[in-house]
Image: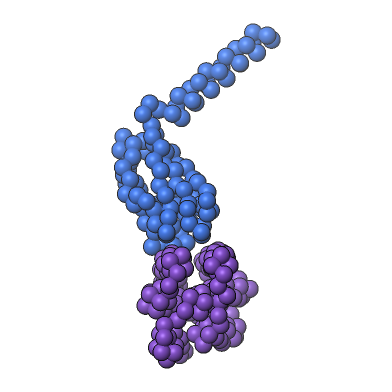
Amino acid sequence: MRAGFVFAAAKIGILAALSIWSSAPAGAETIHVAIDKVAYGPVNISARVGDTIEWSNMDIVAHTATNRDKSWDYMIMPDKKQTLTLKKAGEIDYYCKFHPNMKGHISVKE
Amino acid sequence: MMMHKVATAFAALLLISGTASAQGAKLNDAQIAHIAYTAGLADIANAQQALKISKNKDVRAFAKDMARDHKAVNDKALALVKKLKVTPQDNDTSKAIAKGQADKRVDLAKLKGAAFDKAYINNEVAYHKTVNGALQNTLIPSASNAELKSLLETGLKIFQGHQEHAEHVASEMK
């Protein structure tokens, strides 16, 4: 009974350690994108798998960051932030559903 | 019907640019603030009507966006005029905008279903086009206060986004 508990606790410890390791791979960066005056800045981003994009909405209205392929769609209220960790390589075109004149691009490399 | 809509839009646009020249002087900030605020209020009323009548998912989503965004911009405008100690001043252009859109809602109230959705979204395209043109050509160049000018410039970008969004919803209906 006791041995089983210790084993279970050790397993949780290993899982926790693994999840910390996998959520922060060596060299992963956070890339900040300001949403200001109805535009993403910078418009074009180069990133690596594991990097995190952090959008900050500095405008007076809500915006979205919406992937053209519809795989993600975030509503970002004024003065709020939204993060997305990039899981795979590829070219991402995203836009704001509310103001389609706002467009951004993320180039994700391995 | 379509010609009537286009004619209304052009009449409103002419009125906005015509009022400034007819007065022989450019619009002052108190009048400009009133025009921008009134234009926002009219679009909120249009959105509220659409939310009462329409069952179309895209039209309802668009109307909710309009109500939320125009309220946010108008709240900001109110806070700014308060800060600047400017009292928005009613004028012929504001009156024409309010009446033009109120008349439009009377027409729209006679419609339902897809006919309403189409007429609402077409009016949103035309109305945003008109207001954006007025902002770009008359209101922004005439604004004296830098903060008011900056708010109008951001407003223009937001409303250009609305116009593009409305055009997209309209094109999906065809």
Observer-nearest of A3 and B63: B63
**Colour basis:** by chain
Q: Residue at x 56, y 76 (%)?
A: B88
The colour chain B appears in is: purple
In this rendering, would A89 be left or right of B80? Answer: left
Q: Indicate the colour of chain A.
A: blue
| As drawn, B89 above or below A10 | below
Q: B137 or B85, which is in the foreground?
A: B85
Residue drawn where x is 31% and y is 34% of the image: A110
Quadrant of the image containing the C terminus of chain B: bottom left
**Residue lying furthest right in this view?**
A1
- A105 up-or-down from B118: above or below: above
Q: x, y percentage for residue B73?
A: 52, 66
Instruction: Give x and y (percent) for residue B12.
Output: 45, 86
Of all residues, the one furthest to the front in this rendering is B85
Can residue A87 be seen in this snapshot?
no
**In the rendered image, is residue A21 in sight?**
yes
